[in-house]
Image (cartoon, rainbow, N blue to C red):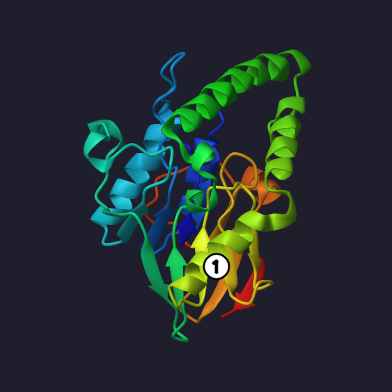
Amino acid sequence: MFLSDLHLGALSSHAELVLRFLQRHPADIYVLIGDILDLWHPLLPHWTAQDQAVIDHLRARAKAGAKLIYIRGNHDPDPSKIPPHAFFDAVYLSSYIHTTAQGQNLLVVHGDEADSRLIRLHMMTRLGSLIDHGLRRCDRVLRKLSRRQPQARSLIDRLVMASNALRYRGRAHERRIVDLARAKGLDGVICGHFHIAALHNHFGLTYANCGDWVDSMTAIEDRGDGVLRRLGGRDYAFSLPKTRPFAGDAPQPTTQKAMSQ
């Protein structure tokens, strides 16, 4: 199971939906592709019981024998600086090679490698986090006033989506990441970061993006048959039943798209 951009600790995170999804889709290997934690908000600390429940679930899965691989993203703290309440046993890496049952070797990276040098500056990441934090504060107030359903996208949601789509128009970011895998002699890439779920081979190699748990609510799965599948989706995530203890969960995957390697 490949997941990215949970942003636990940020106002934009949907930790409750993350937990519902994880309980519905237990895995033997979890590859967490960056921006799992988002703990540096300068206005007010934000860490909820739902955020902690996701961490506790991953801890329990590791204790039950699951392997956790954690690829650091641009919002993640250095592993040595993760506070005790948010730390769990995992293999912490900057990149990873995933080999499918058909012998395809896929580069696993967060994806910020495709950004320009200016965007990759730590200061720019902090600024973006600050702006998002402020927007989400406004969004919470507006949602209470309008009494919108949780799954309904607000005006601020749409503005953030439009800004993201404009930033990554033309899919040049996908080409850059695919070229990074090609330069290493690999067969494709699995990433996150861009908050745009995707699964295709339009550029000659496999490109798989996990999406995010701010808006798209998706993940990538490899069941061991050499086929990558995109799971979840916003409507599916909001339709999942309330959370329960993970023990005894049975996977009931909802597959949006599959692509043979």
Depth order, front residue of 41/176: 176
At which x and y percent is residue 208? 57, 64
Residue 231 is left or right of residue 96, and the answer is: right
Depth order, front residue of 231/170: 170
At which x and y percent is residue 137? 60, 17
Q: Residue at x 27, y 40 (%)?
A: 87
Q: Is residue 214 positioned above or below 133 on the image? A: below
Q: Is residue 3 positioned above or below 147 on the image? A: below
Depth order, front residue of 216/206: 206
Q: Please identify the quadrant where the C terminus is shown.
A: bottom right
For label 1, the residue is 179
Residue 63 is left or right of residue 167, and the answer is: left
Amino acid of disc 1: Asp
Residue 252 seen from this side: no
Q: Is residue 160 positioned above or below 135 on the image? A: below
| Residue projecting furthest to the bottom | 102
Residue 65 seen from this side: yes
Q: Is residue 196 positioned above or below 200 on the image? A: above
Q: Residue at x 58, y 22 (%)?
A: 131
Residue 197 is left or right of residue 28, and the answer is: right
Neighbour tally class for label 1: few under 14, some 14-19, many 20 plus, Cα within 10 Å = some
Q: Which residue is drawn at 72% across and 26% down?
A: 156
| Residue projecting furthest to the front | 117
Q: Tell me where residue 144 sits by quadrant.
A: top right
Total residue callouts: 1
Residue 109 is left or right of residue 168, and the answer is: left
Under circle 1, the secondary element is helix
Q: Tell me where residue 150 sits by quadrant.
A: top right
At which x and y percent is residue 68? 32, 57
